[in-house]
Image (cartoon, rainbow, N blue to C red):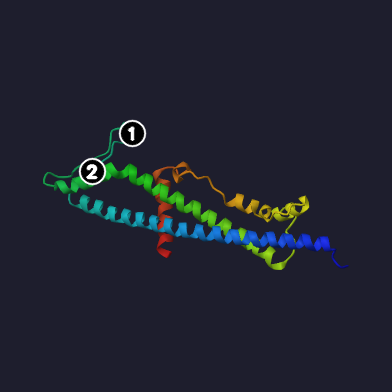
């Protein structure tokens, strides 16, 4: 049976809404990918700096400096000479690392959270884009629970309604990454950074 003109118009409106959603998702995905590339580069630089810092600590240790950890007593960690004629410069390298450690830990955690968050958002955007490209390409109306279908059932003529669900899925708070939950514990951070270091090497 030939489709009624009203039904054909509803299908066309759904397809127009899907095409508009595809366009918006493509722009959003492009922006996310640019930011992800920047965040990955920043994380890669931090990892490279951490490796270089580790090499300096090993060298300082070999030249006669050592860490003395406060441990359960709550005393601060300190650097000292392992033997009487150990160079002061070696001890200073360890002392500077102790002073910088909290800031470096925070900085690495922030970079890690930023990359993780953006990778999730890019993956979500890619899946949403593939879905809406399929709807726009085959010309069939979206499923009953999709934004475009809801719009058609409600009689709305605004194509923006079809983008509401996709936009909400990609929307994030405009708070700094510091407000997000970082990995808990330095051990967890080191493990996650080690995994990301391998990934960074392949980017």
Please name whichever residue, 73 or 178, is drawn nearer the observer in this view of the structure: 178
Residue 37 showing in the rendered view:
yes
Residue 131 showing in the rendered view:
no
Looking at the image, the residue that sits furthest to the top is 73
Which mark is in front, 2 or 1?
Answer: 2
Looking at the image, the residue that sits furthest to the left is 85
Going from N to C along the chain, the mark reached first, 2 or 1, is 1
Residue shown at the point (64%, 59%) measured from the top left: 21
Which quadrant holds the N terminus? bottom right
Q: Please count the marks in the image.
A: 2
User: What crowding class fits label 2: few (fewer than 14 Cα within 10 Å), some (14-19), or many (20 or more)?
Assistant: some
Name the side, left or right, on which 82 lies relative to 173.
left
The residues tagged by marks 2 and 1 sit, at their Cα atoms, a distance apart of 20 Å
Name the side, left or right, on which 160 lies relative to 85.
right
Please name whichever residue, 34 or 87, is drawn nearer the observer in this view of the structure: 34
Which label belongs to residue 72?
1
Residue 114: % across, % down: 45, 51
Looking at the image, the residue that sits furthest to the front is 157
Name the side, left or right, on which 141 lies relative to 172.
right
């Amino acid at each position: 049976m030939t489709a009624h003109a009203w039904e054909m118009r509803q299908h066309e409106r759904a397809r127009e809404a899907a095409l508009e959603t595809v366009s918006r998702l493509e722009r959003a995905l492009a922006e996310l990918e640019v930011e992800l590339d920047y965040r990955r580069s920043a994380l890669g630089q931090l990892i490279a700096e951490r490796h270089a810092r580790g090499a300096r600590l090993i060298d300082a240790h070999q030249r006669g400096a050592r860490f003395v950890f406060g441990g359960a007593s709550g005393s601060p960690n300190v650097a000292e000479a392992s033997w009487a004629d150990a160079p002061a410069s070696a001890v200073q390298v360890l002392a500077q690392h102790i002073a910088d450690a909290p800031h470096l830990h925070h900085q690495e955690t922030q970079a890690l959270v930023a990359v993780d968050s953006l990778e999730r958002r890019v993956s979500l955007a890619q899946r949403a884009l593939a879905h809406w490209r399929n709807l726009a390409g085959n010309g069939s109306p979206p499923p009953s629970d999709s934004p475009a279908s809801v719009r058609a059932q409600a009689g709305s003529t605004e194509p923006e309604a079809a983008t509401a669900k996709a936009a909400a899925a990609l929307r994030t708070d405009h708070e700094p990454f510091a407000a997000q939950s970082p990995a808990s514990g330095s051990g967890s951070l080191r493990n996650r950074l080690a995994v990301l270091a391998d990934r960074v090497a392949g980017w």
